[in-house]
Image: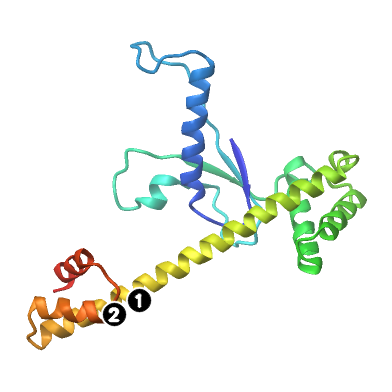
Amino acid sequence: MIEAQSTWSMNILIRVLMYMAKSYQDYIYRTSQDVYASKKVELPKPEIYVIYTGSRKARPETISFAKEFFPDEECCLDVAVHMIYDGEKGDIINQYVTFTKIFDGQVKQYGLTDQAVREAIRMCKDRDVLKDYLSGRESEVVDLMLTLFSQEEIWDMHVRSREKEAAKEAAKEAAVRTTIEEGRYFGASREGTAARIREKFNISQDDIDDLIKKYW
């Protein structure tokens, strides 16, 4: 299994676990094997690679689900992902990485437009980068790139929105915690502190009870 990403994210480890489970499920179904039978099913050996095309300086050879998400604990589940960065000069991976860098440069100049994609294709063909593939497939590649990067842009907006919402919730909890600690310090009752929180914040009674239990 192989995936490419331009933004460094350890969440790729979760995604590949999900891909692997789904792939094995499909494989077992296609080969008519029974996971509930006493006979051990036969599976292809997994190999997982990620091509990283971003500019991050630290470049580990592998990343591990268990080590990244549960670094100080024993974990019954792990997956090791082999990282690929530049490939060997002239090979298909190296050409792909070069294509993404040329494309990123054109996007910075022209935005995420038809012109940016076509100019990147022209430059790659001139430099003999993916030339055989790009020749005769220009319209297909333009449509594909615009679709992929539009989806990535939408996902980035979603992530930024979630991060903003999480920051607001964290700030609200911090303010509630201050109110609780002030109530306890000045000798207020829990009921009085809860009433004060209800007046100041849009929080359910269950959440108020949980926060008072947590910080009182």
Kind of residue at badge 1: Ala
Q: Which residue is mark 2?
A: 175
Asked if residue 133 lies left or right of residue 177, the reply is right
Asked if residue 144 lies left or right of residue 38, the reply is right
Query: In the picture shown, does residue 68 fall above or below 171?
Result: above
Residue 161 is situated, as x and y percent measured from the top left of the image, at: 50, 66
- Label 1 – label 2 distance at C-alpha: 6 Å
Whether residue 196 appears in this view of the structure is yes
Kind of residue at badge 2: Ala
**SS for tag 1?**
helix
Query: In the picture shown, does residue 70 fall above or below 178?
Result: above
Whether residue 44 appears in this view of the structure is no
* Name of the residue lying farthest toward the right: 126
**SS for tag 2?**
helix
Residue 33 is situated, as x and y percent measured from the top left of the image, at: 45, 14
Residue appearing at x 75%, y 46% in the figure:
144
* Name of the residue lying farthest toward the bottom: 186
Residue 154 is situated, as x and y percent measured from the top left of the image, at: 61, 58
Residue 148 is situated, as x and y percent measured from the top left of the image, at: 69, 50
Quarter of the figure with the C terminus: bottom left
Q: How many marks?
A: 2
Residue appearing at x 64%, y 59% in the figure:
153
Identify which residue, 16 or 129, lies in the foreground: 16
Q: Residue 120 shows which numbered tag? A: none
Residue appearing at x 75%, y 50% in the figure:
145
Identify which residue, 176 or 79, lies in the foreground: 176
Q: Residue 171 shows which numbered tag? A: 1
Quarter of the figure with the N terminus: top right
For the residues bearing labels 1 and 2, Cβ distance under 8 angstroms: yes
Asked if residue 19 lies left or right of residue 211, the reply is right
Residue appearing at x 32%, y 42% in the figure:
75
